[in-house]
Image: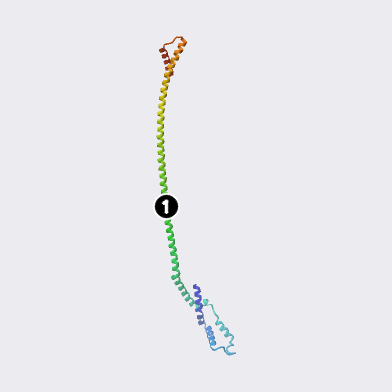
Amino acid sequence: MTVALAMTGAFLWGAPLSAASDPAAKAAVVAQAAQADHGQAPHGQGTHEPAGGKAEAGHGSKSHFPPFDSTTFASQLLWLVLSFGLLYILMGRVALPRIGRILEERHDRIADDLEEAAKHKAESEAAQASYEKALNEARAKANTIAADTRNRLAADSDANRKSLEADLATKLATAEQRIASTKTEALTHVRGIAVDATHAIVSTLVGTSPAPADVEQAVEGALAKKDAA
C-alpha cells in the first residue's frame, strides 16, 4: 500500500518537476501552447524545420518513468513519508488497538478456560478422594462385621461343642454305671449259676451232694483266680 501511494505521488508530482527542470522540454511546451493559441501556421511556414533542431527537440522531450527519475526523488521521499505517516497513524489508531483487544479477549478467554478446567479438576479430585474414603470406610466396616460374625459363630460353635461334650460325658458316665451295675448283676447270677452247676456236676460224678458252702467256696476261688489272670 505504501509503495503504491509513493508511486502515485511520484507520478503526479514528478512530471511537472521534470518538465520545469528540462529547458528543451519547457521550450517545447511553450511552443505547443503558442501554436494552440494562434492556430496552425501558414503553409510553408513553420512546417519545415532543420533536421538538427527537430532531433534536438525530440531528444529534449524524451520522457522518463517518474520513480526512476533522479529529479523526482524529493517528491517521492515526501510522499513516502506522508504515506508511511498515514499508514502508521492508521495502524496505531485503528488496526493495532483492534488486534490488541482481540489478543486480550483471547487471553482472557484462555485464562477463564484454564481456571474452569482447574476448578473441575479440583472438584473431580475431591470427589475421587471422597469416594476412596467412603470405599475404605465401607471395607473397614465390612471387615469389622465379618470379624464379629466369625467370632460370634466361633463362640456359638464352642458353646455347642462344650454342651455336646458335656451331654456325651454325662451319657457315657450313665452308660458306664449302667454297664457296671449290669455286669455286677450278671456276675452275681453267674456265681449262682456256677454254684448250682458245680453242685449238680459233683453230685452226678460222686453220687452224693456236696455241702453248699464247699461248692460256693470252690466257685469263688476259681472266679478270683480268673479275675486275677
What x and y, as percent, mark residue 185? 41, 20
Residue closer to the observer: 223 or 69: 223
Name the residue furthest top: 207
What x and y, as percent, mark residue 181? 41, 22
What x and y, as percent, mark residue 96? 45, 68
Residue closer to the observer: 101 or 32: 101
> Residue sitting at 41 percent across and 48 percent down?
134
Crowding near pointer 1: few (<14 within 10 Å), some, many (20+)? Answer: few
Figure disc tally: 1
Quadrant of residue 143 within the rendered picture:
top left
Is residue 54 in sight in this rendering? yes
Q: Is residue 137 above or below residue 109?
A: above
Q: Is residue 101 left or right of residue 63?
A: left
Q: Is residue 72 above or below residue 35?
A: above
Tag 1: amino acid:
Ala
Residue closer to the observer: 169 or 20: 169
Q: How is the image coloured?
A: rainbow
Q: Is residue 96 above or below residue 60?
A: above
Is residue 228 in sight in this rendering? no
SS under mark 1: helix
Residue beneath disc 1 = 127
What x and y, as percent, mark residue 104? 43, 64
Quadrant of residue 193 within the rendered picture:
top left
Residue closer to the observer: 193 or 77: 193
* Quadrant in the picture for the C terminus: top left
> Residue sitting at 41 percent across and 24 percent down?
178
